[in-house]
Image (spheres, grey):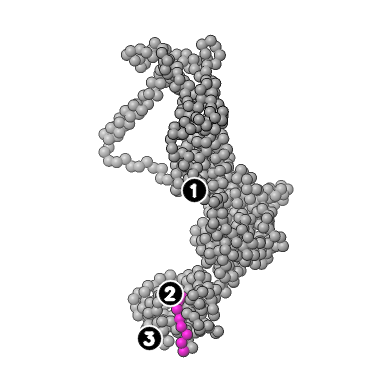
Amino acid sequence: MAGIEVTTLHKRYPDGTVAVEHVDLSIGDGELFVMLGPSGCGKTTTLRAIAGLERQTSGDIHIGDTLVNDLPPAERDIAMVFQFYALYPHLRTRDNLAFPLRAEGLPKAEVEERVAEAARLMRLDALLDRRPHRLSGGEQQRVALARALVRRPRAFLMDEPLTNLDAELRADMRTEIKHLQGELGTTMVYVTHDQVEAMSLGHRIAILNKGRVEQIGTPLEVYDRPASLFCAAFIGSPPMNLIEVELADGKLRSKSGLALTPPPNLPLDRSLIAGVRPEALEVTEPGADGTVPGRVVSAEWLGDEIIYVVDHGGQRDVRVRMPPTVRFAADAPVGLRHTGGPPPVYDASTEELVA
Amino acid sequence: MAVSVDEAVSPGPVRDRRPPRRRSGGRGRVVIEVAVLAVLAAVMLFPVLWMIETSIKENRDVYAIPAKFFDFTVTLDHFKDVFVASGGGPTTLSGSFLNSVIVAGVSTVLATVLGVPAAWAYSRFSVKAKKDQLFFILSTRFMPPVVVVIPIFLMYRQVGLFDTKLGLILIYTAFNVPFTIWMMKGFVDEVPAEYEDAAMLDGYTRLQAFWKFTLPLLLPGIAATAVFALIFSWNEFVFAIFLTSSDAVRTAPPAIAGLIGGTTVDWGLVAAASIVFALPVLIFSYLVRKHLVAGVTLGAVRR
């Protein structure tokens, strides 16, 4: 087991595309580290550079104490699980699992023992004699995971391993991966574009955008205080409401008059945008205390909650998360107020967190 | 290799195999359709049937007027004449067949050996101006070959490749490599690169990964591509007639054409030689027919 250090990573392809502009990561030993970002943000390229499948243009990668820049993938002692499971189609499950061990030249008895252990761990015993095309998507992914862990590598690299599974199976596998990582205590770098996956799995999350790291933090830090407008819009579903505000009478006020508690140390010399989570707003009867008048544009009834889209005479409609007991029809006049603590506030021009 | 063609080449959704429902019109319509198709088939196949008949007729029956369709004596003499000279020993025609086998075989192998790795590289690696390069490679096939036959003839005469098998092999390879690259690139694109990535993480070098994992999955595509290349080289006539002058080098197509002319034409011999010439390609195409369809519908068509 080992931590992974990525310093000033830069990757530019011969055709001129820059996949990774500048990435610094310090991943702890035994950590489940998630790289999150939209497609084309450089997360997969970074992962492939760690694996050794891509050679970075500049920058260093350490796995444990070893500088691995010039090591081929096989000598980095890591295992990778792919979005497309990449099980060898002509081999049965048993041989797929044994394959990396045989490639290493381990004695036969040990190979069998380790395969049996991995199969037990991933509950594959009944599937050992099947070929990949006779396995379901979930089973293939379990085989792929088992193949990664038979090697007992220093780190696991996961490249969107759950993207091809249906929603229910994905949730199950998520639990399974998290459990497995906790059990083995092996460092894991997990790449995904799914923020739910990132939030539920990661010890820490790195949000990447356009080849740069926008924010690194625990799921809660990332959720509560997104470091930039990009992160604010990316994390959370529905996303944060971004409201243009001005400081007046000791309150942050939107154009519609919606009042927010200001955070301390607010710079006053620039235009500001407050990031307000949908659950930090409240829809009330019109005219209630401390509200601004608004109108329900639409309501999404999700069963356990209702998402109201409210026009409050400001610039953009806001989304409000309410319990299912609070019911307003579309077009109904309502009151809108802020209920949470001080929201994170961003500089409108640099798009970065200022307070 | 346990991968069947269907697995390897049809990752997309399985198409509905039911035949389309026949349009209304009933039995009468079916009869008309079958009749029209039968007539068309007869017209299309008649030259082939006539060739086969001619090859097994005695010479007096070949020239009989009115033509004899059924009541003739069957003989295999013409086939013997294709290979065995009248004084014993092999005919020049049999030498031409051997030349054809060598030229078509070697040029196909060369085109495959050069084209498949190139296709793999174009599919897997990020190459500067990849699209332009591929377009340039394809552009060599834009014009009909006959356009360049005179410049090639002059060049070949200058460098001593005129009237050599090597010359023919090189020119056929040059025509087949672009075709192989384009067709194989389609097949390589279909094989997920993750197989190679996984194999590299498991301890193989990139080339070993290609050799052990991607190549076996490409075999159906390679078979289809190679057969197309083989058919091109085997059938090629224009370069064969312009770039060869001696019987020792001449391939079968110009040699068979050379049988016609002179004062009398031994049609029986021409027909028999043509059948012998057509057979290998027919047999090959039949053996790999599944792969050929896959090749036509998958490798050559961009999705």
Element under disc 3: loop
Residues B283 and A68: in front is: A68
Q: Gap in Å between the C-alphas at discs 3 and 2?
A: 19 Å
Within 10 Å of the Cα at label 1, are there few (<14), some (14-19), or many (20+) other Cα atoms?
A: few
Q: How many marks?
A: 3
Question: Three-letter amino acid code at disc 3?
Answer: Gly
Residue at the location (66% across, 64% down)?
A5
Q: What segment is highlighted magenta in the picture?
A: A242-249
Can you give x and y, in whole percent of width and height, for residue A27 in the image? 65, 66
Tell me where residue B226 appears, x and y as whole percent: 52, 35
Quadrant holding the N terminus of chain A:
bottom right
Residue density around tag 3, few if under 14, some if 14–19, many if 20 or more, within 10 Å? some
Q: Quadrant of residue A293?
A: bottom left
Subunit of mark 2? A
Q: Is residue A245 magenta?
A: yes
In three-dimensional space, the C-alpha distance between marks 2 and 1, rounded to whole angstroms, equals 49 Å
User: In the image, residue A353 lies at what x, y percent?
Assistant: 53, 76
In contact (CB < 8 Å): disc 3 and disc 2: no
Please report, as a chain letter, where disc 1 is located.
Answer: B
Dot in front, 1 or 3: 1
The disc labelled 2 sits on which kind of residue?
A: Arg
**Observer-nearest residue: B108 or B11?**
B108
**Residue identifier under label 1:** B132
